[in-house]
Image: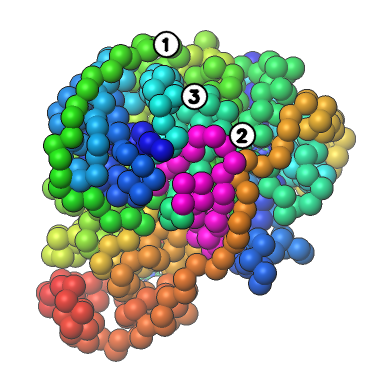
């Protein structure tokens, strides 16, 4: 079985994001970029499927700027076999929308014919939570989002999903798109020898135009603003004062 | 312009709060038709008809629509889409599952987790865990939108609007439901509660999380948790508040043993009053708390329960 894992290069989750003064976006110049945390979980799950003998090949795919090569090298160092970069933007400030990403991924999937796609539930930059579902729609495949447990058995997968009410388990026909949630696994760190080995693994490169996909945005960004700041509060000395304050405000 | 709004239906019942909030956000854009879909949805449809601002209710009943599986639900919505300029839903986990699929089938971009409706084409939404608010203008012919319910007030009582039943395209047969694990609780629902008490890693164990629950019960509150507390097994996944969990904006939010990582703040920083109890005076949560108490939670929380 072949598993395809789309990985996105995003601002590192530890970086304090700053909105540009002119309201044109957030400042990505000279900030640390990393693999989207959910995609690390997806890569980890794919590698575990390979280690368990369920999968025989893991292919990582990234769409964006040329530097997304680094993200793909990380996936390779974790244990992916091969990677494909689709250059679709010249500048990190140009985010490719989930619909366009899904169209490109569909084209890659038509070529690669994987049985399973493991994507992240959400990219932590645009917080869209959409690509996996859109890809599944374009392919006419089954989808299982927000997975916290995955079991592949022959021609189907049983997936436990984190939903508002608790947990839901569904059984999906393969091929399927599964988007992964935080509690599916704990991703491994790439070891130094594996980082060295990853440098020799194949990393193919294409462009969005090679697939004939138009990546121009459907959503025009009018402006990007700082959220309203909260008024500074106060430190109360003890529980009695806290209770008095809350009574004053009429909330207890 | 006309809006098709997916009502939040769970096991045949309407979740009134998220649906009424979404109706309120949608009604400025045109006549609102609420779709209630499920194995049984008639009761939900009758309830939706009594929300102020609802012009019409469509009831779609079919076994394939039970458990809101994405593929048949999306196909159902797409079969109705022709008549509407906007297809909207409260941003629940069900809608996040279904609506991007609907958008892709219509070849439009989904606009997720909208916190402000500017006009028919223009919407505000938080990005980067709420570190920035982006205003986007859609160039698509149809807008497919999920609405962050914590950002909108609920529409009141009205109607009753007329209710019609609609045909269901059926089941594409791609996936099947196996089971739900839903914890029953007498506490208020997290995203609509007036008061929320959340515990973090500082609580230390599942057993000690009872202390958080006790404080919550004293305040008639819902219980929340940080990701760290959920990951550690102190609390179930559906209690997680944050960027990738639930977003809440109660009158009062009490954070106990939570450091205040940006991903947690993303889910609660629009609360009216924030109280933080943490033994570390430098914890970032104190920078956004209205009232901070630097204390060991194992002393402060029992004392608070006693004095409230
Ligand atoms: C992709 C991604 C998504 C995420 N999504 C979310 C999300 O949705 N929600 C979320 O919450 N997090 C999320 N996180 C995790 C987030 O980054 C933090 O790791 C998490 O919020 C930390 O939880 P915490 O504050 O409980 O734990 P910690 O940061 O460990 O803080 C524990 C606090 O408890 C205090 N404490 C300890 N003992 C006591 C005591 N006896 N009395 C009083 N105080 C005490 C400590 O001083 C400390 O401040 C996400 C992370 C990533 C990478
Ligand atoms: N540019 C991209 N390149 C590769 N994968 C992506 C890209 N954008 C989104 N994805 C995948 O889709 C998931 C959800 O992203 P989003 O829908 O943008 O929140 C991510 O976790 C990735 O797995």
Sort mark 1 into few (<14), some (14-19) or many (20+) by Cα contacts within 10 Å: few
Residue A159 in picture, x, y percent from top left = 44, 26
Say which chain tag 2 marks.
A
* Placement of B187 over or under B44, stated as above or below: below
**Are the residues under badges 2 and 3 in a single subunit?**
yes
Residue B44 appears in which quarter of the rendering?
top left
Residue on which the image places disc 3? A143
- The residues colored magenta run B119-147
Disc 2 target residue:
A99
Quick check: is B55 in the magenta stretch?
A: no
Hey, which residue is sitting farthest bottom in the picture? A237
Number of other residues with Cα within 10 Å of mark 3, as a class: few under 14, some 14 to 19, many 20 or more: many
Q: Residue at x 25, y 86 (%)?
A: A238
Mark sitting on residue B173: 1
Q: Position of residue A233 (x, y in %)?
A: 37, 82
> In this view of the protein, which residue sits in the foreground, A145 or B15?
B15
């Amino acid at each position: 079985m072949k598993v395809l894992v789309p990985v996105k290069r995003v601002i590192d989750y530890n970086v304090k994001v700053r909105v540009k003064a002119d309201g044109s976006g957030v400042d990505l110049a000279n900030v640390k970029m990393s693999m989207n945390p959910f995609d690390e979980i997806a890569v980890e799950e794919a590698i575990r499927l390979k280690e368990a003998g369920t999968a025989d090949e893991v292919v990582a795919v990234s769409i964006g700027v040329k530097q997304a090569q680094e993200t793909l090298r990380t996936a390779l160092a974790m244990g992916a076999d091969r990677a494909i970069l689709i250059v679709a933007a010249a500048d990190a400030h140009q985010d490719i929308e989930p619909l366009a990403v899904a169209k490109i991924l569909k084209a890659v999937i038509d070529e690669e014919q994987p049985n399973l796609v493991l994507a992240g539930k959400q990219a932590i930059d645009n917080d869209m939570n959409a690509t996996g579902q859109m890809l599944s729609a374009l392919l006419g495949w089954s989808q299982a989002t927000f997975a916290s447990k995955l079991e592949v058995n022959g021609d189907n997968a049983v997936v436990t999903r984190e939903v508002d009410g608790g947990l839901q388990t569904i059984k999906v026909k393969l091929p399927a798109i599964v988007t992964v949630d935080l509690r599916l696994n704990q991703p491994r760190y790439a070891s130094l020898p594996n980082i060295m080995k990853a440098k020799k693994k194949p990393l193919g490169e294409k462009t969005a135009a090679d697939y004939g996909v138009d990546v121009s945005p459907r959503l025009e960004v009018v402006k990007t603003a700082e959220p309203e700041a909260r008024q500074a509060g106060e430190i109360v000395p003890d529980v009695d004062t806290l209770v008095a304050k809350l009574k004053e405000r009429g909330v207890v | 312009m006309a809006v098709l709004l997916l009502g939040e239906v769970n096991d045949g019942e309407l979740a009134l709060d998220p649906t009424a909030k979404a109706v309120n956000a949608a009604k400025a854009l045109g006549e609102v038709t609420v779709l209630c879909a499920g194995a049984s949805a008639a009761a939900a449809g009758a309830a939706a008809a009594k929300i102020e601002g609802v012009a019409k209710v469509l009831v779609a009943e079919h076994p394939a629509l039970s458990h809101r599986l994405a593929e048949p639900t999306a196909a159902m919505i797409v079969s109705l889409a022709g008549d509407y300029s906007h297809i909207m839903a409260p941003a629940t986990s069900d809608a996040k599952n279904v609506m991007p699929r609907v958008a892709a089938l219509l070849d439009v971009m989904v606009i997720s987790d909208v916190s402000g409706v500017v006009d028919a084409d223009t919407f505000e939404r938080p990005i980067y865990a709420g570190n920035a608010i982006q205003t986007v203008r859609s160039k698509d012919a149809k807008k497919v939108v999920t609405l962050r319910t914590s950002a909108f007030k609920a529409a009141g009582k009205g109607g009753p609007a007329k209710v019609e039943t609609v045909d269901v395209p059926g089941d594409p047969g791609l996936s099947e439901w196996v089971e739900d694990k839903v914890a029953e609780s007498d506490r208020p629902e997290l995203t609509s509660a007036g008061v929320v008490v959340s515990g973090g890693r500082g609580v230390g164990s599942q057993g000690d999380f009872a202390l958080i629950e006790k404080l919550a019960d004293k305040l008639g509150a819902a219980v929340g948790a940080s990701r760290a507390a959920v990951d550690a097994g102190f609390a179930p996944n559906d209690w997680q508040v944050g960027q990738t969990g639930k977003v809440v904006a109660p009158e009062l939010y009490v954070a106990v043993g939570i450091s205040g990582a940006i991903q947690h703040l993303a889910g609660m920083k629009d609360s009216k009053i924030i109280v933080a109890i943490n033994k570390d005076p430098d914890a970032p949560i104190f920078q956004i708390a209205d009232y901070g108490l630097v204390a060991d939670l194992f002393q402060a929380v029992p004392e608070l329960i006693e004095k409230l």
